[in-house]
Amino acid sequence: MSKLHLYNTLTRKKEPFVPLDPERVTMYVCGPTVYSYAHIGNVRPPVVFDILARVLKGLYSQVEYVRNITDIDDKINNAALTEGVGIDVISARYIDAYHADLDALGVMRVDIEPRVTEHLPEILAMISKLIEEGHAYEAEAHVLFDVTTFDAYGELSGRSQDELLAGARVEIAAYKKTPSDFVLWKPSDDTQPGWDSPWGRGRPGWHIECSAMVKAHLGKTIDIHGGGADLVFPHHENEVAQSTCAHAGAPYARYWMHNGFINVNAEKMSKSLGNVLLVKDLVDDYPGEVIRYALLSAHYRAQLDWSDDTTQQAQSALDRLYGALRDADAVNETDSAVPQAFMNALLDDLNTPKALAEMFNMARALNASGDDAERAQLKSSLLACGQFLGILAQDPVAWFAGAAGSFDEEAINTLVADREKARADKDWVKADELRDQLLKLGIEIEDVTGGTRWRKARQ
């Protein structure tokens, strides 16, 4: 496969990707609502679309990738009230935490990261346009979108109006013409943040925010819109409706992509179950690259069941790849292209499990080869593939040393040397005692041809 194919939620099939303008590829992904720390499910979209951005930037000269920050939200308001601070204090804290999490996972910064609070004029203009065109109405200090004015409503989620009303997350209110009409603007009381508008002091609804930011930074029609599967309805469905109607029927997004859910030990993450895995806690126990690898080990559209073994399996897999590189430390790298089989896997709807399998094929070949030229090519190819996936970025020796800075490396090297001498003297009792002493220090040793290597013990 030499051309990028993506699964389009809108058409429910895999399609060749053909950008509207090959000189300017546009992608928007829904970002975080910054009221708390990110859990593992929150970071699956940025990792997935980070891979897509890397692929796109390898194929096209200009790619504009926008991921927003929602910093106007009732959950933020509630957190601010609880702490007795402004919403900007809450937002700033969790924006910094979110960036730290993504940095730990090796996620590249996006090209543009707009915030809702910076786009009130664009939001008000879009709402006014929808009212003017007869797609929205005022009612009891609210402005609502009239879904009956958009015939394609429900097309993205594949549901009829009856199904949407029966099972959707819609707020039933007396002031709505139709129960599935959704809020574009709502009033704020004295305890809530608010902005002046033609319809009174208030704040925007959730859905209009993304539509306004997409228009402001990427235009009326974009190539790719992404997010988690939980956003298909109502958020993305409502984005389609309001954006299409605000722009005289112009298509909103040409390709819709959604990643699957993450469950924990086969159960949905929830505070009530006490199984919410915060990224900041995970990276305290494992390198961020391990968390990233685990997220890439399943196809992005598949549900990922995060178990107690997930991180350990990812750690072990990375150890194998880093081990091949460490054993080839003396081999000089060459200018080597990414192998076509690896690239074909990513071009086939970001098939990261298959791409990783190709990397293990390379690692096995590298371990088995005795030809210097072949080893140089394999090592270079393996590193190039790692760069595409955002892994294998560390020095292999440093990887196995782990948090070596917290150990006395000189003392460890002395113990290792003493053990090697004991082995040479065939003093097996002393050699075993020194191994046990190193283990108590959190150090594992590995006897290989030519000597002994050590690394931080894995959990």
Image (spheres, rainbow, N blue to C red):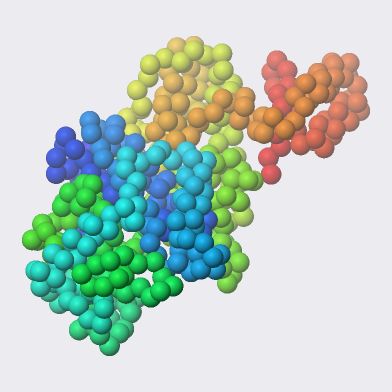
Residue that extends furthest to the bottom in the rendered view of this protein: 174
User: In the image, is 440 to the left or to the right of 311?
Assistant: right
Kindly identify the residue that appears in the image at 49 percent across and 57 percent down.
90
Q: Where is residue 284 in the image (x, y as percent from the top left)?
A: 63, 46
| Above or below 279: residue 329 | above
Give the total number of marks visible in the rendering. Answer: 0
Any part of residue 186 in sight: yes
Q: In which quarter of the image is the C terminus?
A: top right
In the displayed structure image, the side of residue 293 where residue 122 appears, left or right: left
Pick the residue in front: 181 or 369: 181
Residue 270 visible in the shown view: no
Q: Where is residue 57 in the image (x, y as percent from the top left)?
A: 29, 34
Q: Residue at x 76, y 36 (%)?
A: 442
Q: Is residue 434 left or right of residue 69?
A: right
Up the image or down, 356 lies above or below 196; here it is: above
Compared with residue 59, is residue 178 higher up or lower down, i.e. above or below? below
- Residue sitting at x 18%, y 60%: 125
Q: In which quarter of the image is the N terminus?
A: top left
Left or right: 380 as drawn, with respect to 417: left
Q: Nearer the viewer, residue 440 or 381?
A: 440
Q: Position of residue 185 (x, y in %)?
A: 27, 70
Residue at 28% across / 55% down in the picture?
Answer: 119
Tell me residue 156's x, y (percent): 23, 64
